[in-house]
């Protein structure tokens, strides 16, 4: 067929249109439009849990994405920003909140770990846990119009957890009468609290916190233990002396053989070992049962202050010093119930060289309570009264205490006893930190009966201390004729801390200056402190219209209550108004202990007076005054001449 050129052009255009129409759907399918979504499923590969335990359960999330159309499958099937949270935990206690997992691509999986607590009374069986899975993904992609459709999704999934019927064990009771420092046998009760019988049971017991089973652990072979049954295990037990009273946690690792003959390990069995409180005692000595130089009975009562009965007890005199010689220091005690007391007595000789008075004896109690180990109690102090005790008293106590200053506490110590005290030391002990005494031991001269000797302590009182009464205690320490150290006291007395006061009182002697003139400013200062002050530098400061020409003065030494005059030079401007103006001054000085102190600022009033009016006299007035004076002098001379003429 012969076609003209115009016909060929028309046919060509038609074919191009047909080809374009045919190729459009193919381009849409192959050029990038994609639609799909991820699909997440959840399951627990190891889903068995045991009642009374807390277990980590891994939840697997698997992505099996679906693509409806298109080729960009990775984009539309990937779950992004995946997180898991528990929606319904069922009968379990599941810890933790939202668990972030990141992205999960198609065909991939990831694990969310949950801490699952299973109640001890939960029946065996299968239970569901509901989870919320949140993520975002791209639903579709349209390259021709540059559109990407993203969305977020909440997907609810469930997993099944199985509570097994495996045997479980618990330490249900511990029987012991051991106290810290004792060894013996304890009985540990182990119970199968599971729902299944256990065969060939083996347990390893461990203690801690000063509690030791055997040589560190005790292995016990129990054989079979049916569900709900218990067995009692005798355990060699040692408690350290430093073990604290109360509950000590213990554990048992338990292995058993299951119904299929497979060896398994049960969750650890926990329990509590309750120690018996350590026994405690009090010892009270009778008054006036002993006298100096005589044989007598150191007697009294001992009481069981603990919570357990004490058997096989012995009261021991540990120490009474050389003043008391105890013939037999051990006294057998009967069984003592808690709170029960019994009498004791020791044959004792008091040294004739011992000064009478209250002394301290130290006791202890040994007991075994039927066991193989003997326990010794802590030392028990008790005061023993001996007739004719030495006696002292404090007299004429005085103090010079003030806030922020050094001072003294002084008085006299009188010996009211019947023996001369030599090598004595008077020890002062303030009951408050407000009073600081560097040297608290005052060496006494020999003090005869009835004699009083003076003493004095140097003190320091801080600047932040509150004024008011304080208590100090005195103790007399001395050696008797056998060089035995003895104490008498404490003797409590009251002292007074005065409020902080200034070092000096300042009185103005010459404190007036005329306007436009200058003069000496004379001030008198008095030492108000109860100690001598030295190298006192005084300095005066003045503001306009006053000025100080000589601003410093010095005093070498001032005893308590002594005064000294300070002289300064002060001026007032010519146009100064007549009234009172303040000047300021401070002092820098040294205390008796060599401390350099800068005082607070003092103020002193200065009176400015009207200027003296000399006037501008004219020469005539001045001459007249001169002539008048000369005339008076001449008249006096003439009168004297006439008087001499008469007498010759």
Image (spheres, grey):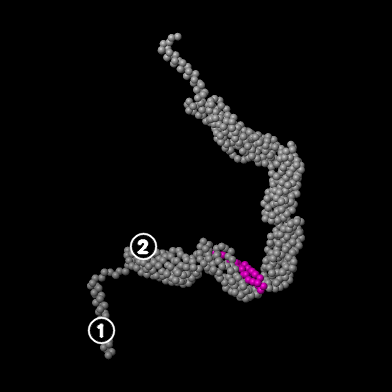
In the structure shown, which secondary structural element does the residue marked by tag 2 occupy?
A: loop
Is residue 51 placed above or below 389 in the rendered structure? above
- On the picture, is 569 further left or further right than 161? left
In percent of width and height, residue 285 lies at: 71, 65
Q: Say if residue 375 shows up in the picture.
A: yes
Q: Nearer the viewer, residue 495 or 337?
A: 337
- On the picture, is 362 further left or further right than 622? right
Compare marks 2 and 1 and give the one earlier in the sequence. Answer: 2
Is residue 170 placed above or below 645 in the rendered structure? above
Within-10-Å neighbours for mark 2: few <14, some 14–19, many 20+ = few
Is residue 239 placed above or below 330 in the rendered structure? above
Tag 1 residue: 638
The picture quadrant where one finds residue 434 is bottom right
The picture quadrant where one finds residue 578 is bottom left
Q: Nearer the viewer, residue 285 or 77?
A: 77
Within-10-Å neighbours for mark 1: few <14, some 14–19, many 20+ = few
On residue 536, which mark appears?
none
Q: Nearer the viewer, residue 386 or 477?
A: 477
- Of labels 2 and 1, the one closer to you: 2
On residue 544, which mark appears?
2
Q: Quadrant of the C terminus?
A: bottom left
The picture quadrant where one finds residue 102 is top right
Task: Give me the C-alpha separation between circle 2 and circle 1.
Answer: 57 Å
């Amino acid at each position: 067929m012969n076609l003209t050129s115009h016909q060929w052009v028309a046919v060509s255009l038609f074919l191009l249109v047909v080809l374009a129409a045919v190729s459009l759907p193919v381009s849409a399918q192959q050029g990038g439009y994609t639609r799909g979504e991820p699909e997440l499923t959840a399951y627990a590969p190891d889903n068995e849990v045991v009642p009374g335990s807390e277990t980590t359960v891994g939840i697997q999330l698997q992505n099996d994405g679906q693509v409806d159309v298109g080729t960009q499958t990775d984009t539309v099937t990937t779950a992004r920003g995946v997180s898991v949270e528990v929606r319904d935990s069922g009968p379990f206690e599941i810890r933790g909140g939202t668990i972030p997992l990141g992205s999960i691509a198609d065909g991939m999986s990831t694990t969310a770990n949950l801490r699952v607590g299973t109640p001890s009374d939960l029946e065996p069986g299968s239970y569901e846990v509901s989870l919320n899975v949140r993520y975002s993904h791209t639903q579709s992609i349209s390259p021709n119009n540059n559109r990407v459709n993203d969305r977020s999704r909440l997907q609810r999934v469930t997993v099944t957890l199985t509570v097994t019927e495996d045997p479980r064990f618990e330490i249900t009771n511990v029987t012991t009468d051991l106290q810290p420092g004792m060894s013996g046998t304890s009985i540990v009760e182990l119970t199968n609290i599971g729902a299944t019988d256990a065969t060939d049971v083996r347990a390893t017991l461990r203690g801690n916190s000063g509690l030791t089973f055997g040589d560190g652990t005790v292995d016990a072979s129990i054989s079979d233990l049916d569900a709900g049954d218990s067995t009692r295990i005798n355990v060699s037990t040692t408690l350290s002396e430093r073990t604290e009273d109360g509950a000590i946690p213990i554990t048992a690792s338990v292995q058993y053989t299951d119904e299929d003959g497979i060896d398994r390990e049960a969750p650890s069995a926990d329990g509590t070992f309750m120690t018996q409180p350590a026994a405690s005692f009090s010892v009270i000595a009778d008054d006036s049962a002993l006298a100096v130089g005589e044989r007598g009975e150191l007697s009294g009562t001992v009481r069981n202050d603990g919570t357990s009965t004490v058997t096989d007890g012995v009261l021991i005199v540990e120490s009474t010093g050389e003043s008391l010689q105890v013939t037999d220091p051990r006294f057998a005690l009967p069984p003592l119930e808690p709170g029960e007391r019994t009498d004791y007595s020791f044959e004792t000789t008091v040294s004739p060289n011992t000064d009478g008075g209250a002394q301290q004896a130290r006791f202890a109690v040994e007991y075994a309570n039927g066991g193989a180990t003997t326990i010794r109690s802590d030392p028990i102090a008790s005061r023993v009264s001996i007739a004719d005790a030495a006696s002292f008293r404090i007299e004429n106590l005085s103090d010079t205490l003030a806030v922020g200053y050094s001072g003294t506490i002084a008085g006299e110590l009188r010996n009211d006893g019947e023996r001369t005290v030599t090598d004595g030391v008077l020890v002062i002990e303030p009951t408050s930190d407000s009073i600081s005494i560097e040297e608290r031991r005052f060496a006494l001269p020999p003090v005869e009966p009835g004699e009083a000797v003076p003493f004095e302590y140097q003190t320091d009182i801080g600047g932040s201390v509150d004024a008011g009464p304080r208590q100090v205690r005195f103790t007399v320490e001395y050696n008797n004729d056998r060089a035995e150290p003895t104490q008498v006291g404490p003797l409590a007395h009251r002292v007074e801390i005065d409020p902080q006061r200034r070092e000096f009182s300042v009185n103005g002697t010459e404190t007036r200056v005329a306007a436009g003139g200058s003069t000496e400013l004379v001030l008198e200062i008095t030492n108000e402190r109860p100690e001598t002050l030295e190298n006192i530098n005084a300095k005066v400061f003045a503001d306009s219209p006053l000025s100080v020409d000589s601003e410093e003065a010095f005093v070498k030494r001032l005893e308590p209550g002594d005064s000294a005059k300070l002289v300064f030079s002060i001026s007032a401007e010519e146009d100064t108004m007549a009234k009172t103006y303040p000047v300021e001054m401070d002092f820098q000085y040294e205390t008796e202990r060599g401390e350099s102190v800068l005082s607070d600022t003092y103020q002193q009033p200065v009176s400015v007076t009207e200027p003296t009016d000399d006037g501008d006299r004219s020469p005539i007035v001045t001459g007249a005054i001169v002539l008048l004076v000369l005339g008076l002098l001449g008249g006096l001379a003439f009168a004297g001449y006439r008087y001499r003429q008469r007498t010759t």
